[in-house]
Image (cartoon, grey):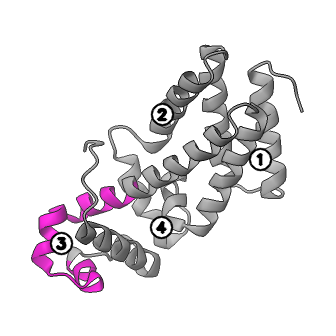
Amino acid sequence: MTGTTMPRTPAREKLLDAAGRLILGSGWQRLRVSHVAVEAGVSRQSAYNEFGSKEALGEALVMREFERHLDGLTEQLLDRREDVGLAVEEAVLYTFRSASANPVLKAVLTSARTGLVMGELAEVVRNREVPPLPQAITAVTALVARHRPDLDPFSVRLAIDMVLRVTVSYLVTPEGSHEDAAARIALMATRVLGLPVR
């Protein structure tokens, strides 16, 4: 598998939306490309022309949800780039809320069993050459390096690795409110970066 992003054509988006609905309803294992075609209102041949196989469809869905989330995460970080603690807190809250509202995204982020319906889809994530979490760490590290060159690069990578992994841990095993968890994770990040605590 590769991480190449395919163009988002209207037919492709309809098929991915349909696949997401069907997976939420009956799980990844029962999904068939022909079912997705019917749900999307396109021909079976068109669906196979777009994806070629169920596995390719699953990977496309996984990567679309991951890339959408990464775009939103980038926005949160850039909007608050001057206040690192607040930027981390808002980015973590954004992740918690997005994952709560989107079980497909939650399966992508945790790559773990999040219920029988979503569990099998996590295999698609685990089988990628570059799983989403390391990809996110690399992308966010590059973003911070561009926009906050004043921060120590080693500490930045360490903090981002810690923030993303702890955030995923909270998604898998929630404890307390989202707000409290986000504040705690932001405090960890500022300590790792040696910044003043708000």
What separation in Å lies between label 1 and label 2 (alpha carbons)?
20 Å
- For disc 2, the neighbor class at 10 Å (few under 14, some 14 to 19, many from 20) is few
Q: Out of 43 and 30, give the one closest to the viewer.
A: 43
> Disc 4 residue type?
Met
> Disc 1 residue type?
Ala
Relative height, residue 15 to residue 68 (above, below): below
Q: Which sits earlier in the primary sequence, circle 2 or circle 3? A: 3
Q: Out of 130 and 17, give the one closest to the viewer.
A: 17
Q: Which sits earlier in the primary sequence, circle 3 or circle 1? A: 3
Residue of label 3: 47
Relative height, residue 138 to residue 102 (above, below): above
- For disc 3, the neighbor class at 10 Å (few under 14, some 14 to 19, many from 20) is many
Q: Quadrant of the N terminus?
A: top left
Residue sitting at x 40%, y 47%: 126
Residue sitting at x 88%, y 28%: 197
- Let me know if residue 72 is in the magenta part: no
